[in-house]
Image (tube, grey):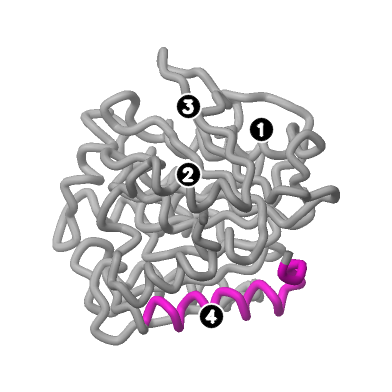
Amino acid sequence: MPVRLPTLILAVLLGGWSAAAQEPDTAAWTAHVGAEYRVINDVTYLTASNYQCRLDVYVPRGATTPLPTVMYFHGGGWVARSKEYMVLNILPYLEMGWNVVNVGYRLGNVANAPAAVEDGRCALRWVIRNAPQYLFDTSKIVVTGHSAGGHLALMTGMLPESAGLDRQCPGEEKLAVAAIVNWVGITDVADLLEGANQKSYAVEWLGSQPNREEVARRVSPLQYVRAGLPPVLSIHGDADPTVPYSHAVRLHQALERVGVPNQLLTVPGGGHWRFTAQQDARLIAEISGFLARHGLTRVRPGPR
């Protein structure tokens, strides 16, 4: 008998199975999730740099009306990991009964910055264009991700058209999201290229471009803070050795100054999203509350 999603999530949280630590067994994952979700794997949403950018779609079985939809971006410093490796991070949204779009994108070995940011925007355009087929509620699209994925969620949700990073996939659709959930995301890429906060993954992603500082600023969420942005929830450990905690603080302060609804959840002593099971459970509850406060909920049907 397939394990229902609530049971699976409880086992993940209490069993200490870190969502960021390992890729799940494909057969087991399909058996568990396939009982309640229709899963469409490896849909190509963009071809660029001779590379097919692909995503996976999860739609609740029996859905007949448009549903809130989350787009998830995996971490890995823009140069590593895959959408499959971090797939367990979508579990809370599956439990909420949402549609889920798990997005893959060009890593640094395929194309340097700003390619991954362009891919995020193209994935959003694909979601909006294909909303009728998959029952995506385009008024309730939430973008989220961990680390570099948190950065891509921020960029996907914050970029104005004037930034010129939508040109890989031109269209007439208005690219907008309802909320952003940022797990330990980078907010100032230039800060990671040199000096005390230099990180090898950022240096690799920017490569040897002669204008890398300019590109770094162009792909930094802090450059796009302005009034009218969607609500932003940031989660960050104050002992993070990989993405400085100051990135979350500076984003929070900048959003406060322009009146954008936002919240910063600090994990005392927390490292790079490697939190305890109890902390993860609390954070998931906080995310649920944040989404509810901004009208982004779906009441699941009763037992079948």
* Crowding at mark 4 (Cα within 10 Å: few <14, some 14-19, many 20+): few
Q: Is residue 1 above or below residue 26?
A: below
Q: CA distance from mark 2 to mark 3?
A: 22 Å
Q: Identify which residue is drawn at 57% across, 54% down.
A: 143
Total labels: the figure holds 4
Name the residue carrying label 2: 30
Q: Does residue 216 belong to the magenta stretch?
A: no
Q: Secondary structure under badge 4?
A: helix
Disc 3 to disc 1, how far (Cα)? 11 Å
How many C-alpha atoms fall within 10 Å of the one at disc 2: few (<14), some, or many (≥20)?
A: some
Left or right: where 196 falls relative to 54: left
Kindly indicate whether the residue at mark 1 contacts the one at mark 3 (C-beta within 8 angstroms): no
Which amino acid, mark 4?
Ala
State which mark lies toward you, 2 or 3: 2
| Dot 2 or dot 3, earlier in sequence | 2
Q: Please name the amino acid that badge 2 sits on.
A: Thr
Q: Which residue is mark 1?
A: 126
What residue does disc 4 label?
285
Residue type for callout 3: Cys
Q: Position of residue 272 (x, y in %)?
A: 26, 67
The residue at the point 71 percent across, 69 percent down is: 303
The amino acid type of the residue labelled 1 equals Trp
Q: Earlier in the sequence, mark 2 or mark 4?
A: 2
Q: Mark 2: which secondary structure? A: helix
> Disc number at residue 53?
3
Query: What are the residue bounds of the magenta stretch?
Result: 279-303
Among numbered discs 3 and 1, the one appearing first in the sequence = 3
Image quadrant assignment for residue 274: bottom left
